[in-house]
Amino acid sequence: MTKGGRLVVEKDETVAVSSSDDVVRVRQAVRARAVEAGFGIVDQTKLVTAASEIARNTVVYGGGGTLVIEIVREGARRGVQLTFSDNGPGIADLKAAMADGYTTGGGLGLGLSGAKRLSNEFSIESTPGKGTTVTLARWKL
Amino acid sequence: MAEIPILKIGDCLLVSIQVDMHDRLAMELQDHLTNRIVSEGARGVMIDISALEIVDSFIGRMLNNIAAMSRVLDAVTVVVGMRPAVAITLVELGLSLTGVRTALNVDKGMALIRKAIDDQGGTLGRREG
């Protein structure tokens, strides 16, 4: 995420992601930061929905973890970057996990792929046995 | 713990979701609503989501499930009041809510339910008006 200049973090906040109630708190915290960054209602909704999907994965598959929410600036543009980390079992087959409709948990299999579509930038790193980190960002258009 | 109220109006059940739902609450609503359809002999179910700021895949799945369950119990489900930003996001998320009838507001939703009941479950368009 370094194209076009240096990424400056204006503000950051860490939120626990360990229960179903935390998923709701994540949505509220991300919404507040998106408003602060000047996002319109559609961009807010897309970012909050992406955050909700990944937060649920962190709880259900990752066994809980943390979210760091950052308001970032890169040159003239402003955005919100979210980093979800867990120390869970990791994802054995990342390629399959990113495909629409793939699930090991009985859901719709849209969490990761849907969150990626709702983000401007998206990356996932996972080590089996160690955990998973998902980073996504949305820029104010 | 808070519970989402289910109101009975004639032979219909009305649910207005006014809180940011955690997953357990969504599952409970699904169960309660299915039980009430049977115990009340309801023919229609209207779910007002105008207060919902997001519909993610979990809530979307709940809406799909409620519609499917009510269909096998001979009731019609209509989801009303979806916010424009929510609709835009849902489509991009990849959730098409096939099988869920929608209407713009409660009035149109009720008209859709009445028409569906009158047609005795005949095929209908997905959106009234």
Image (cartoon, helix red, strand yellow):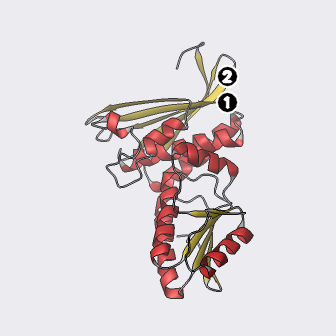
Residue A8 lies, in percent from the top left, at: 60, 20
Establish if A108 lies above or below A96. below
Is residue B124 or residue B95 the one in the foreground? B124
Is residue A37 or residue A16 the one in the foreground? A37
The residue at the point 46 percent across, 63 percent down is: B24
Q: Is residue A115 left or right of residue A73?
A: left
Residue B95 lies, in percent from the top left, at: 51, 50
Please tell me how crowded label 1 is: few (under 14), some (14-19), or many (20+) other residues with Cα within 10 Å.
some
Establish if A82 lies above or below A1. below
Question: What is the secondary structure assignment of the residue under circle 2?
Answer: strand
Please tell me how crowded label 2 is: few (under 14), some (14-19), or many (20+) other residues with Cα within 10 Å.
few
Farthest residue to the top: give it. Answer: A5
Question: What is the secondary structure assignment of the residue under circle 1?
Answer: loop
Q: Earlier in the sequence, mark 1 or mark 2?
A: 2
Establish if B73 lies above or below A89. below
Residue B78 visible to an observer of this rendering:
yes
User: Which quadrant would residue B106 be assigned to in this image?
Assistant: bottom right
Q: Are marks 1 and 2 on the same chain?
A: yes
The amino acid pointed to by label 1 is: Lys
Mark sitting on residue A77: 2
The residue at the point 60 percent across, 51 percent down is: B54
Mark sitting on residue A140: 1
Q: Is residue A89 left or right of residue B29?
A: left
